[in-house]
Image: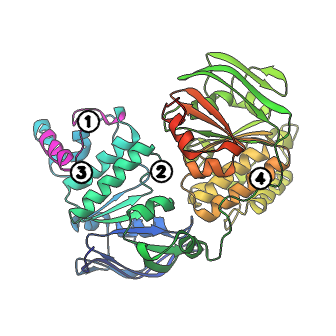
């Protein structure tokens, strides 16, 4: 890391109606560093990177890039000055080839008659420089999430970016893909590219970053050298208080009663899935991305159809043909993709929370609006959903608060069996603890939870037992007294032998 400033933010403020998203932020970024940006959901990180990328205009303040100051900073100005942003939601065209995507948006990609041979040559060159073996002619839709992430990086490298912003880049990647991405980021830094790295994953940040800047409630708090800080210090800076154990201790134990029994469930790539869930239990599900965990969850919820097997609820065999049927049987799903499958993102909170329980709160054909409003207010308070009003559109909430709306919607339907698929993905440390505490409260009340998680520490930290998936099969079941990270990782990688 050098001492030359490549990017300077001076007194950046961004005001929205009723919200000060950024409050007088000043920050210096040096050439050739990996600079992590951290903070809880709603801390202002997303607004910050949108301003640096030119997608959002600051209400006040000045941006300086390579010594040149700007009062108006658009996305085209950002691009002209070597700034590229890769957001969580990729900006790729699935129906086009890798080469067409990489060259899209530059002069070569705008030609009326595109020279495919030249585009392929340009793409092959940038992929080679990045150490990638992706076929430039393959359709993007056929690539894995990790490969698509690499194509996004290649797309920026064609533009010769000097500052690359990565927003939660490993949120949907497997362990192997994450390792590849982190190696790529180091390579880019070594070539002189400055990286702004936004992530909630503390382990990654400590592994890869040179410095870290912490934001809280729209304010810049502090910048530290990674080698001079600790995990505990960083959490304290983010949440503004000392925080106890990341995984709150349980005060109750699972009961003997079996509430859900799955026998030889097959379909959607899964084979012969057999397990039981006890009343008051948190049953963790570990495995690599693509191991069949989400498919299992969606079959139990009736969103995907099984090909064979039996599902028993409270000792009675059930045919779950749809989500509506699952809900009527007391099963609720908090899906992995909360924005597309968990909530109606462009509708308000007070429309989302009661949507699955509206029939129970109706007088004849008409919903009881007072009862519904009481329910909404109760869940906003119970889950501490940070919102100026129940009328707030869900899209305008932070990721953590969007997840709380998904939880509220499912809990309002009075589900006794909750399936939580990656419930804390993209959520800050403080909100994670709130969700863990809520899970403990729910099982203490007699509800039962199946929790799918790709974070090893999390699945070991909250579960009573863990199912380990590998390529659509259960490779093992481990009780809490025998949790072993090496064993779980080995089984998740398909290794059956004793370690």
The answer to whether residue 220 is left or right of residue 407 is: left
Q: Residues within 10 Å of mark 4 (few under 14, many from 20)?
A: many
- What mark, if any, has residue 440 been given in the picture? 4
The reply to whether the magenta stretch includes residue 351 is no
Q: Dot 2 lies on which element? A: loop
Residue bearing mark 1: 97
Marks 4 and 2 sit apart, C-alpha to C-alpha, by 25 Å
**Which range is magenta?**
120-141
The answer to whether residue 32 is left or right of residue 287 is: left
Residue at x 53% of width, y 37% of height: 499
Count the marks.
4
Which numbered disc, 2 or 1, marks the residue closer to the eye?
Answer: 2
Marks 2 and 3 sit apart, C-alpha to C-alpha, by 26 Å
Residue bearing mark 2: 171
Which numbered disc, 4 or 2, marks the residue closer to the eye?
Answer: 4
Residue at x 52% of width, y 32% of height: 291
Above or below, comparing residue 234 to residue 107 in the picture: below
Ranked by sequence position, the earlier of labels 4 and 3 is: 3
Marks 4 and 1 sit apart, C-alpha to C-alpha, by 47 Å
Q: Position of residue 106 (x, y in %)?
A: 19, 52
- What mark, if any, has residue 105 been given in the picture? 3
Which numbered disc, 3 or 1, marks the residue closer to the eye?
Answer: 1
The reply to whether the magenta stretch includes residue 124 is yes
Contact check, label 2 and label 1, Cβ < 8 Å: no
Residue 174 visible: yes
Ranked by sequence position, the earlier of labels 2 and 3 is: 3
Foreground residue among 59 and 172: 172
């Amino acid at each position: 890391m050098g001492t030359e400033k490549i990017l300077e933010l001076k007194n950046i403020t961004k005001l929205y109606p009723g919200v000060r998203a950024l409050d007088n932020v000043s920050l210096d970024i040096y050439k050739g560093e990996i600079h992590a940006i951290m903070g809880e959901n709603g801390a202002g990180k997303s607004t910050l990177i949108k301003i640096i990328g030119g997608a959002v205009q600051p209400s006040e303040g000045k941006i300086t890039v390579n010594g040149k100051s700007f009062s108006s900073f658009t996305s085209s100005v950002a691009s002209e000055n070597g700034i590229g942003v890769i957001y969580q939601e990729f900006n790729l065209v699935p129906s086009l080839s890798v080469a067409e995507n990489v060259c899209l948006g530059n002069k070569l990609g705008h030609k009326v008659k595109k020279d495919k041979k030249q585009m392929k040559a340009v793409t092959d060159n940038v992929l080679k420089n990045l150490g990638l073996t992706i076929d430039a002619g393959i359709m993007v839709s056929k690539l894995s999430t990790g490969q698509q992430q690499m194509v996004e990086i290649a797309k920026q490298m064609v533009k010769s970016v000097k500052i690359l912003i990565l927003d939660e880049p490993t949120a949907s990647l497997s362990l192997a893909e994450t390792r590849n991405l982190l190696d790529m980021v180091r390579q880019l830094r070594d070539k002189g590219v400055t990286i702004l790295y936004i992530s909630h994953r503390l382990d990654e940040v400590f592994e890869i970053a040179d410095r870290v800047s912490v934001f809280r409630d729209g304010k810049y708090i502090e910048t530290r050298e990674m080698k001079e800080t600790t995990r505990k210090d960083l959490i304290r800076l983010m949440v503004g208080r000392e925080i106890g154990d990341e995984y709150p201790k349980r005060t109750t134990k699972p009961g003997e009663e079996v509430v859900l029994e799955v026998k030889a469930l097959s379909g959607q790539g899964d084979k012969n899935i057999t397990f039981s869930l006890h009343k008051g239990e948190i049953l963790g599900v570990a495995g690599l991305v693509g191991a069949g965990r989400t498919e299992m969850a969606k079959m139990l919820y009736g969103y995907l159809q099984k090909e064979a097997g039996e599902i028993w609820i409270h000792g009675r065999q059930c045919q779950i043909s749809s989500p509506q049927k699952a809900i009527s049987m007391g099963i609720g799903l908090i899906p992995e993709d909360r924005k597309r499958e968990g909530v109606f993102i462009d509708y308000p909170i007070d429309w989302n929370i009661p949507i699955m329980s509206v029939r129970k709160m109706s007088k004849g054909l008409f919903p009881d609006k007072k009862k519904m409003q009481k329910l909404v207010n109760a869940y906003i308070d119970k889950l501490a959903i940070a919102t100026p009003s129940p009328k707030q559109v869900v899209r305008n909430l932070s990721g953590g608060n969007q997840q709380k709306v998904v939880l509220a919607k499912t809990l309002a339907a009075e589900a006794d069996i909750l399936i939580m698929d990656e419930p804390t993905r993209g959520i800050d440390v403080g909100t994670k603890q709130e969700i863990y505490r809520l899970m403990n409260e729910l099982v203490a009340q007699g509800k039962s939870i199946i929790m799918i998680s790709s974070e090893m520490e999390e699945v070991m930290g909250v579960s009573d037992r863990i199912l380990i998936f590998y390529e659509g099969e259960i490779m093992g079941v481990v009780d809490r007294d025998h949790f072993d990270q090496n064993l779980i990782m080995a089984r998740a990688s398909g290794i059956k032998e004793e370690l």
